[in-house]
Image: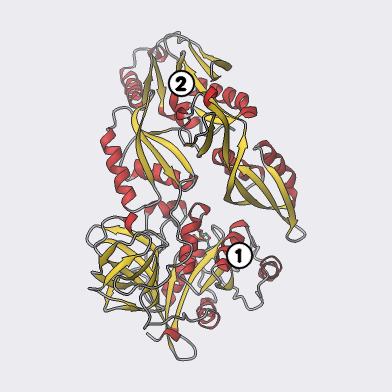
Amino acid sequence: VDRENIRNFSIIAHIDHGKSTLADRLIEKTGMITQREMQDQVLDKMDLERERGITIKLKAVRLNYKANNGKDYVFNLIDTPGHVDFNYEVSRSLAACEGAILVVDATQGVEAQTLANVYLAIDQDLEIFPVINKVDLPSARPEEVAQEIEDIIGIDASYAPHISAKEGLNIDQVLEGIVERIPAPVGDENKPLKALIFDSYYDPYKGVTCYIRVFDGKIYPGMKIKLMSTGKEFEVTEVGISTSKQIPVDFLSAGEVGYVAASIKNVKEARVGDTITDAYNSTDKPFPGYKKVTSMVYCGIYPAEGEDFNSVRDALEKLQVNDASLVFEPETSQALGFGFRCGFLGLLHMEIIQERLEREFDLNIITTAPSVIYKVHKTDGEIIDIQNPSNLPKPSEIDYIEEPIVSASIMTPSEYVGAIMELCQNKRGTFLNMEYLDQKRVTLKYELPLNEVIYDFFDALKSKTRGYASFDYELKGYNRSELVKLDILINGELVDAFSMIVHEEKAYERGRIIAEKLVDVIPRHQFAIPIQAAIGSKIIARETIRALRKDVLAKCYGGDISRKKKLLEKQKEGKKRMRQIGSVEVPQEAFLSVLKYD
Ligand code: GTP
């Protein structure tokens, strides 16, 4: 293909504004995949993603389009994940493009992630092509939203097509817009190979497959390539393009997007953001911005009673093959036995992995409260990173502790400002500023401790604003803070899986709430069970689970055998999900209930 006729672009949007639906329409209209072949949403591959309506793994698809000017174009549509946890991956996919279609919902207008994504696109110098979606809805206000885009984002939206991705209205305007608005790639085929990896995954037949954008030079089977972050060399076994399926080609050259396989064994060796070059004739500079992703949130994952440690490890290993950002290492808990400490990009990533372990691998697992990484400055001068509260040194060895802080921006209709400020205050937030976007909408900027955000911040924000506020954050740095380790004792026994690091001022409240929760979720036993919250040796809250007076079966009247059986079976079922802690049986849900404290 002539480079002049290539268009490489992504679609960016706030969640639910119609990104995937528009992608489907573009794919359908360019006839790349017949309607019958096309599943509902081609780009969202995994079931889980579809159910949750989010895009986790990105991918590229190549479309052919004959424009009104009579020329044939090649479109490479590069999919981006739609959540802040995956911002780095989004930025790498955007780096592979010359432009981005910005989808804005005509009923909702510009939202927090619209802006966050636009900023990522602007950082990559992309041409932004706005499109106003969902104009079929009665509450659509496309003119107003166009004005909003101009006022808030500062780009001309007067030409933005008014579309309905769902009903296929005005999609041809989008296709023509791609040709006219998005620049063709530049690059030099005669220079040494320089290609950017924007996605990689493990294929059981081909080994690791990388999605790449070639900027200079050519890549072809048999070529010896080098990955610039590690210096490791590989021989290319296949290059190709992906349409509805992968089609091998003889080469990919400057400006093109496609995939490459090179018998790479592990996704860790071909990480997103890395630069591929010719092993014998290297490009002088790799792409800027390559970074090894770092985990923001950690939690313990343990096999539930009766589950096998090895099967949990196997499952984590399998997931890791395709997810270089998942990290884990074995750890032991007194309460839960052998398990793993796992690191995630964020809370959503954590939830996705937990769900996949349960659904795809059919495992029963127990997860401990999520934690962030604390920097502990010891009195002997050593600074250590702590992600497991149980590993916190003794108070006498601690000089001070620092915790991660995020800069958060919350976009909201102005009537909720009061409620949000109260929430942020409550979460130890520091107010930075407030900006009116227009008469009705406001952006609030706060600095918040990440450890408050990972609890129930999202849920609380949603419920306080009836879902109207949107939220985005990025790691800002570390601040010194008065933190303590909060322990929970059940029947006098410290249960390490419940330990958490919290701000001193919050410890009492949090301890009391957890103790109250546990009283609700732990069934009554033949004896009374004290539940205590403690800081060091100081008990700060106490509740008691009263002793059971009668046998459950006593509830059954008149010797109804089948009913009795059912009850016993139910108990057995429940037992499987119990954890024996000392002489107390603790149900699995108890471990989850400490995660939410509202
Ligand atoms: P994420 O993948 O979660 O980021 O969302 P998305 O931006 O890809 O949105 P998606 O395409 O999944 O659409 C979200 C919802 O809006 C779905 O229920 C769509 O059916 C609906 N939707 C998308 N486009 C339109 C439209 O033009 N009109 C109407 N009425 N609904 C639409």
Q: Label 1 crowding class (10 Å Cα cut-off): few <14, some 14-19, many 20+?
A: few
Identify the coloring.
secondary structure
CB under 8 Å between discs 1 and 2: no
Which label's residue is closer to the chain start, 1 or 2?
A: 1
Q: Which mark is residue 137?
A: 1
Label 1 CB, ligand 1: below 8 Å? yes
Query: Residue 583's x, y, as percent?
Result: 38, 14
385 left or right, relative to 573: right
Q: Is residue 468 visible?
A: no
The part of the image, by quadrant, that contains residue 150 is bottom right
- Amino acid, disc 1: Leu
Question: Label 1 to label 2, Cα distance in Å?
Answer: 48 Å
- Residue 434 lies, with reference to residue 59, above or below; the image says above
Residue that label 2 marks: 522
Label 2 CB, ligand 1: below 8 Å? no
The part of the image, by quadrant, that contains residue 39 is bottom left
